[in-house]
Image (cartoon, rainbow, N blue to C red):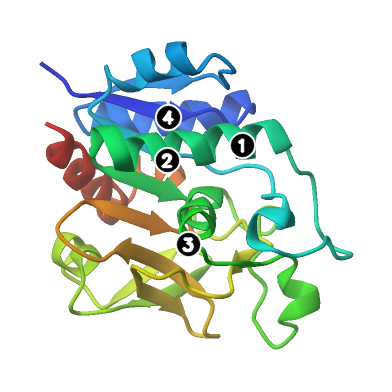
Amino acid sequence: MRPIIGVTNTTRQGFIDAYVNAVAAAGGAPLVLPVLDDSSALDEVLGRLDGLVFSGGSDIVPAHYGEAPIYGLEETRPARDSHELAVLSRVYTHHRYPVLGICRGIQLLNVHAGGSCYQALEKQRPDAGMHMLINVYPLESPAHEVSITPDSRLHAILQRERLAVNSFHHQAIKELAPGFKVTAVADDGIIEAIEREGDRFVIGVQWHPEMMAKTDQDSRRLFEAFVRQCS
């Protein structure tokens, strides 16, 4: 039996397809999660999952990490924020299955645990390199490299200290939440991956491995390792 892997909905059809196909290719049975107001229905759905992917998409409302919006903040979806933060709380408390956060997903993991985000890298970190390269490189093409921390779950999966990744984000982790550790950084110091301390599989990456999975072995390895943990 394939493990059932929930995938939060990005509302962008072409993008959600990449997530579900990457999960399926890695051996999982993907299930796209709607934004549910009914907590009983939500618990019923979450109880049937074996793992969960938090996908990319809109910016997180800055109030969730104690800040007012600044110029450069892009589209927010408050209902999605509230839903996904509630989902993550339920997963940690009641279900305890593996979690993979991608792009917005890594930021959600961090904000949920008390961390914060740069709302607009180009405004708050003008010294950093360009990270929003969606119109510069094909979605599946590497845009820059990251350095992976040797003593990390990510390193154990990929067995490498340097990794070429794609890059489509204008936000990033600013203050790291308690209980997490940084496991990859870009050459300009921007945090590119984190994982929760302890034995549970909770990994967040700032790049989009689902878009690279068809052609990139390392992206496939990440999804395969995640799905194995869900089995």
Q: Nearer the viewer, residue 141 or 71?
A: 71
Determine whether, in the image, residue 196 is placed left or right of residue 230.
Answer: right
Foreground mark, 2 or 3, reads 2
Amino acid on which the number 1 mark rests in the picture: Ser
First of labels 2, 3 by sequence position: 2
Helix or strand or loop: what does disc 4 sit on?
strand
Helix or strand or loop: what does disc 2 sit on?
helix
Determine whether, in the image, residue 127 is placed left or right of residue 9.
Answer: right
Q: CA distance from mark 4 to mark 3?
A: 24 Å
Foreground mark, 4 or 2, reads 2
Q: Position of residue 132 (x, y in %)?
A: 67, 62
Question: Which residue, given by chain and number where applicable, does mark 3 sit on?
Answer: 142
First of labels 1, 4 by sequence position: 4
Question: Which residue, given by chain and number where applicable, does mark 2 sit on?
Answer: 88
Q: Say which quarter of the image contains residue 87.
A: top left
Question: Which residue, given by chain and number where applicable, does mark 4 sit on?
Answer: 7
Q: Say which quarter of the image contains residue 30.
A: top left
Amino acid on which the number 2 mark rests in the picture: Leu
First of labels 1, 3 by sequence position: 1
Q: CA distance from mark 2 to mark 3?
A: 30 Å
Say few, some or many: other residues with alpha carbon within 10 Å of mark 2 (under 14 / 14 to 19 / 20 or more).
many
Q: CA distance from mark 1 to mark 4?
A: 16 Å
Q: Position of residue 188 (x, y in %)?
A: 55, 85
Q: Position of residue 214 (x, y in %)?
A: 35, 39
Question: Which residue, given by chain and number where applicable, does mark 1 sit on?
Answer: 82
Determine whether, in the image, residue 204 is placed left or right of residue 119.
Answer: left
Q: Residue at x 18, y 24 (%)?
A: 3
Amino acid on which the number 3 mark rests in the picture: Pro
Foreground mark, 1 or 4, reads 1
Q: Say which quarter of the image contains residue 229.
A: top left
Q: Is residue 205 above or below residue 4?
A: below
